[in-house]
Amino acid sequence: MIETISRTGYAFLRYLATRLLRIDLMLLALVVTLTTIGFIALFSAGYSFPWRIEGQIRNIAVAGVVMLVVSCIPVKAFQKATVPIFIVGCVLLLLTHFFGVTVKGATRWLNVGVCIQPSELMKLAVPMMLAWYYNVRGENVCNWDHLTAFIIMAVPVGLIVKQPDLGTSILVLIAGASVIFFAGLSKRILVSLTGILILSMPVIWSLMHDYQRQRVLTLLDPSADPLGKGFHILQALIAIGSGGFSGKGWMEGTQAHLDFIPERTSDFLFAVFSEEFGFVGNLVLLALYTALIGRSFYIAAFAETRFSRLLAGAIGCIFFTYTFVNMGMVSGILPVVGVPLPFMSYGGTALLILGVCTGILLSVSAESKH
């Protein structure tokens, strides 16, 4: 008995050592670098909120441990767990609809001893479910398979829109749609869907909540209400512009330290970074995010199975969407929808999900032959 346990323990340690030796150092280095830069910027933005800094240290530690644990799990284990995870996520969304906690008119949280936000889980559960579905269907997919995949995706997206949570629903929709695209959606169907979306804009506008319409109108003309709805965007733009070419220097940003930038440790951290590190800092940041997204797609291209390829590609799109939407809303080219900057903004749940995504990429990379 003791000998059997010893052999099992030795085999497990050997497996862990093999996984760690095959870890993707480039991906890991990019994530660590972005997290470090983010903490430096957050320290400056939140120096008057020490509990935020302490909380972020805890969040980074938890996400880091989860990332390493997930990286040691075989991809087949994720594949087997996909359907239960998706079903649990949908059930939690339904429970949130009926028994959720309402804050500021939105019912997005569920109290299960602690308050959780089930929609965050669906950012990863939806692309996993679609990758699993296409893997089961095999290489020869048809239009009916794409329709089925769209219906699978529409269920959680519809429940999230109902909360209402437009930002998260868009992220889940893009993550799921990227899997459908990578699975072989024809250009003809893609063009047709784009045309239908454009033509349905008046209907979508009529179905939007008043505050959602106001966000779009504020985007078009933030100066119409400079002390109200347009305050966030205008102050962020002032901070970005005042950073100039090389920035004002770390801890020297006046817009942040004089409390002009709202949500400066979370959604608008990019404005703080831009003011303190300027155009040069932004170029470095964009290069790092481009390398992270490119590395994700590189891992996807060399993945062993169809499930791995589709899921890794979707994670690359998740990184891109987070980055583009956050920088876009802070820069005034997209409406404010409450999306954090990946690996940089303050937040526990979002950082945890990103840690899981990175862990999955590391697992896929460890099992590939590149």
Image (cartoon, grey):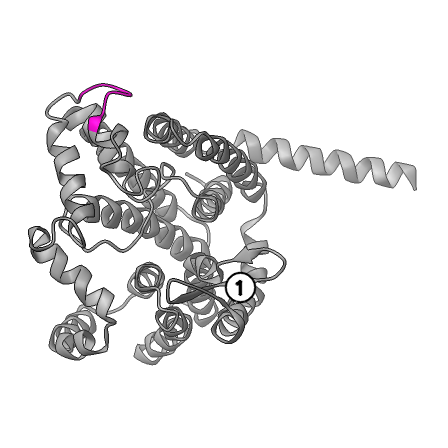
Q: Is residue 135 left or right of residue 3?
A: left
Q: Is residue 78 above or below residue 284?
A: below
Quadrant housing the C terminus: top left
* Closer-to-camera residue (99/149): 99
Q: Amino acid at mark 1?
A: Leu
Determine the image quadrant of residue 213.
Answer: bottom left
Q: Residue at x 24, y 65 (%)?
A: 211
Horizontally, residue 354 falls left or right of residue 10, namely left
Q: Quadrant of the N terminus?
A: top right
* Badge 1 density bin: few <14, some 14–19, many ≥20, Cα 10 Å: many
Residue shown at 39% from the left, 68% from the top: 160
* Residue at the (53%, 57%) spot, across then down: 116
Q: Quadrant of residue 259?
A: top left
Query: What segment is highlighted magenta in the picture?
Result: 248-254
Question: Which residue is nearer to you in this view: 301 or 337?
Answer: 337
- Observer-nearest of 336 and 16: 336
Give the residue displayed 56% in from the left and 44% down from the top. 70
The percent coordinates of residue 214 (x first, y second) are 17, 63
